[in-house]
Amino acid sequence: MLGEAEPQWISEEVKTGTTIIAIEFNGGVVLGSDSRVSAGDSVVNRVMNKLSPLHDKIYCALSGSAADAQTIAEMVNYQLDVHSLEIDEDPQVRSAATLVKNISYKYKEELSAHLIVAGWDRRDGGQVFATLGGLLTRQPFAIGGSGSSYVYGFVDAEYRRGMTKEECQKFVVNTLALAMNRDGSSGGVAYIVTIDEHSTDEKVILGNDLPTFFDQ
Amino acid sequence: MEKHFTDSRVKGVSTGTTILAAVFDRGVVIGSDSRASIGGEYVSSKTINKVIQVHDRIFCCMAGSLADAQAVTKTAKFQLSFHSIQMESPPLVISAASVLKQLCYNNKEELQAGFITAGWDKKKGPQVYVVSLGGMMISQPVTIGGSGSTYIYGYVDAKYKVNMTREECLQFATNALALAMGRDNVSGGVANLVVITEAGVEHIVIPGDKLPRFNDE
């Protein structure tokens, strides 16, 4: 056909669109993400795991431009390996977050990615850090990505201090499901990572196993 | 960074707002915040009323350009009262919504306003209709609108239940408005709520300091 437009994935930047969340509990953290990667209106990957390990007990959640986010995660993974060899013990979550923040801040004009860093270390237990725009702040929980706008109200209302690990996992799954239902750039399956002193546990929740709400 | 659309490119004074309406077992609750701003930088009114009565048991909430919304609701109010006289009976909620829809659709190039219409009539009981920017009209059990609504989609999806009691629905609406006003900088002030049932209409105003507070405050 004459004048047919080419598919958008040829010309549009690949973004992770996304909904990401991380929350701390007494003794660890839970991270969660959706799995959709879009280029304009096309979904170029429907099963991408946006929870990327920076170290054994430190993970980061990626959002924004897929390339930028992955590159930052890989660079910090390398820098953290070197650092942990130098200090001869497992790195602190704060160190990992600081490395991410340094890159995000220095290249803030060129990059458009936001990483949430969360993990467990011996010194301060479970911690969640937000690094949006190059700031570094520790929070009890953090949400990010395009889908997060739709669930600010939900997380404000539902978060309580002192939740158990199971309550945190439920909170993360519910938040992801709600955001994935409303945000066009979030969807697919939900990836959940639970990190505590004893283990790092990765889980996938398939689309039809996600919680449903009154209009479904 | 995530981009989200606000109606900050609206001309002139915008209601940059949060509006909602929800059906419960015997009636409907419709409510809004009370802030009007110019370009998101100056609050031109802290106590503006965005819940307009268009007939005895039919109210509507406006979002978008304040001037457009006021002009449309005034016209609709007139047309509806004329219609009600001709029919010799109170108008149906769907008629009120249709009048707004006709105005929005036929003038879609010039207007920049959206509405939520809620009310009670004898034929179908409590109903909520939403007329969006281009003039689409649909009926929903619960609906939210305005710039602040983005932040409470998750909350509304999770917490709304069909056939709630009046008290549960009021609490739900108050919480939703409070959460949206807490995150959206162009929504704020007091919460204006109206409860419409067969028996009558009740206005509730909740000042900012009496709104529910959540963990981060």
Image (spheres, coloured by chain):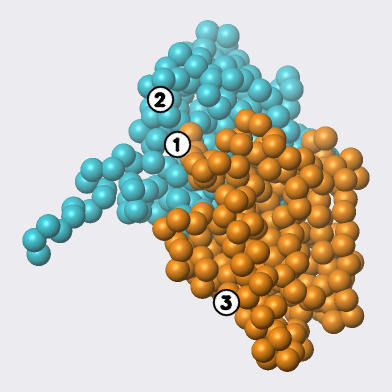
Chain colours: A cyan, B orange
Q: Is residue A195 visible?
A: no
A138 relative to A24, above or below: above
Q: Which residue position holds label 3?
A: B98
Q: Which residue position holds label 1?
A: A64
**Nearer-the-camera pick, B77 or B190:** B77
User: Which residue type does callout 1 highlight?
Assistant: Gly
Which residue does the image show at 89% across and 40% down from the upper left?
A: B209
B24 relative to B123, above or below: above
Image quadrant of residue B128? bottom right
Disc 1/disc 2 C-alpha distance (Å)? 9 Å
For residue A188, side relative to residue B22 (left or right): left
The answer to whether the residue labelled 1 contacts the one labelled 2, judged by CB atoms less than 8 Å apart, is yes
Which residue does the image show at 70% across and 78% down from the upper left?
A: B81
User: Which residue type does callout 2 highlight?
Assistant: Leu
Chain at numbered mark 3: B
**Nearer-the-camera pick, B158 or A5:** A5
Chain at numbered mark 1: A
Residue B56 at x, y percent in the picture = 80, 75
Q: Do tags 1 and 2 sit on the same chain?
A: yes
Mark 3 lies on a secondary structure that is helix
Mark 2 lies on a secondary structure that is loop
Image quadrant holding the C terminus of chain B, namely top right
Q: Is residue A27 visible?
A: yes
User: Which residue type does callout 3 highlight?
Assistant: Ser
- Which disc is residue A111 wearing? 2
Residue B119 at x, y percent in the picture = 74, 75
For residue B87, side relative to residue A98 (left or right): right
Which residue does the image show at 38% across and 22% down from the upper left?
A: A110
Residue B50 at x, y percent in the picture = 72, 55
**How crowded is the residue under tag 1: few (<14 C-alpha within 10 Å), some, or many (20+)?**
many
